Image (cartoon, rainbow, N blue to C red):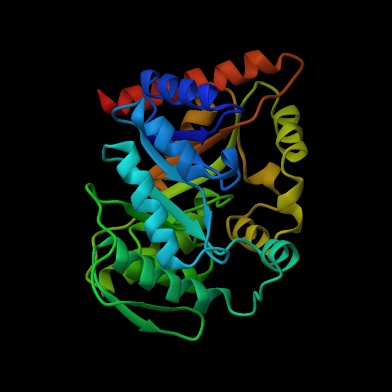
């Protein structure tokens, strides 16, 4: 069971300490949000130099504010600074409220915008010349300008049918958030796998991201998840994928319960088609530290088990 955690830290030293501990505890990956230390690629370069095996990925880089050529150059710089394999780029178009409200950019065609972006970016990361004029993005690079010492995987934040098709055709898989097992089984995996197969690409990765709370009182655990998930109540994309999976809210979509129940639910994600799990551990109850420890200990044990 490939299990990763959210990456980050309030200072560079804490960020590096977290990465070292995650690797020592057997976790396979750390996933860095776009706001970590102002730029997750810088954080990952720091963490990558102080670790040897743990995969470091973004969850996710926003596409709209950064031209794909500049993004490819930034990725190549971070990969070179890491000095080892294990850098993975999860990217996506973010949400209308962010792109229009914060950046003042048009969000009229996120599917088309993302497809053009991904076609350009993945070609650049393969070291190819690019001459592409699209409706959203244009890039003219007559010779290879992006050189990577180690391959970099690209995952797309894909929940809709179009995005899943794009992820299968051009990316190495999809990185999800708030997709319950039922949504992965009947919506995500079939579309993603078919698109990859039709494009002659390898079987794609599916990184399933969900809140996880190890706690004996299920009602209290779901209340703790709800308190940390207010933003998802107003996101149409997350609402749709949760509904497909039979959940009305983040609290219902979350994986909660005691150790045995949480383990069974995690295995259910794999049975549904997920290849990796991105866990956001949520504390619950009066002793938050104990709850966090129970969650981390369980996930660490499962991660170690799969590596043995």
**Where is the C terminus found, in terms of image quarters?**
top left
How many callouts does the rendering have?
0
Q: Nearer the viewer, residue 239 or 121?
A: 121
Q: Nearer the viewer, residue 272 or 123?
A: 123
Residue 239 lies, in percent from the top left, at: 68, 59
Side (left or right) of 203 relative to 303? left
Q: Nearer the viewer, residue 237 or 66?
A: 66
Residue sitting at 36 percent across and 25 percent down? 50
Residue sitting at 26 percent across and 37 percent down? 84
Is any atom of residue 268 visible in this view? no
Is any atom of residue 181 visible in this view? yes
Residue sitting at 34 percent across and 52 percent down? 76
Residue 302 lies, in percent from the top left, at: 39, 25
Residue 220 lies, in percent from the top left, at: 75, 28
**Where is the N terminus found, in terms of image quarters?**
top left
Residue 42 lies, in percent from the top left, at: 47, 41
Q: Nearer the viewer, residue 96 or 253?
A: 96
Residue sitting at 51 percent across and 43 percent down? 40
Residue 216 higher or lower than 169, as above or below? above
Residue 253 higher or lower than 160, as above or below? above
């Amino acid at each position: 069971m490939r299990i990763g955690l959210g990456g980050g830290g309030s200072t560079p030293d804490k960020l590096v300490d977290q990465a070292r501990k995650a690797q020592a505890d057997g976790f396979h990956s750390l996933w860095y949000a776009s706001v970590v230390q102002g730029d997750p690629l810088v954080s990952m370069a720091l963490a990558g130099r102080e670790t040897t095996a743990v995969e470091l990925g973004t969850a996710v880089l926003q596409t709209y504010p950064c031209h794909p050529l500049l993004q490819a150059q930034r990725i190549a710089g971070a990969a070179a600074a890491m000095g080892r394999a294990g850098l993975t780029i999860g990217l996506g178009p973010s949400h209308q409220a962010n792109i229009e409200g914060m950046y003042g950019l048009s969000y009229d065609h996120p599917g088309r915008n993302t497809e053009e972006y991904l076609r350009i970016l993945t070609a650049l990361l393969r070291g190819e010349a690019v001459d592409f004029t699209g409706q959203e993005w244009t890039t003219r690079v007559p010779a290879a300008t992006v050189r990577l010492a180690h391959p970099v995987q690209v995952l797309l934040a894909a929940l809709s049918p179009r995005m899943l098709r794009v992820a299968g055709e051009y990316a190495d898989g999809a990185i999800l958030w708030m997709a319950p097992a039922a949504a992965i089984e009947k919506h995500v995996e079939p579309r993603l796998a078919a698109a990859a197969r039709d494009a002659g690409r390898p079987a794609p990765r599916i990184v399933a991201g969900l809140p996880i709370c190890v706690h004996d009182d299920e009602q209290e655990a779901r209340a703790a998840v709800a308190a940390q998930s207010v933003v998802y109540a107003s996101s149409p994309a997350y609402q749709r994928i949760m509904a497909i999976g039979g959940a009305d809210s983040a609290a219902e979509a979350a994986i909660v319960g005691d150790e045995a129940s949480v383990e069974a639910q995690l295995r259910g994600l794999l049975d549904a088609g997920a290849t990796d799990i991105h866990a956001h551990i949520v504390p619950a109850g009066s002793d938050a530290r104990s709850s966090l420890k129970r969650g981390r200990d369980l996930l660490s044990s499962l991660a170690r088990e799969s590596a043995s």
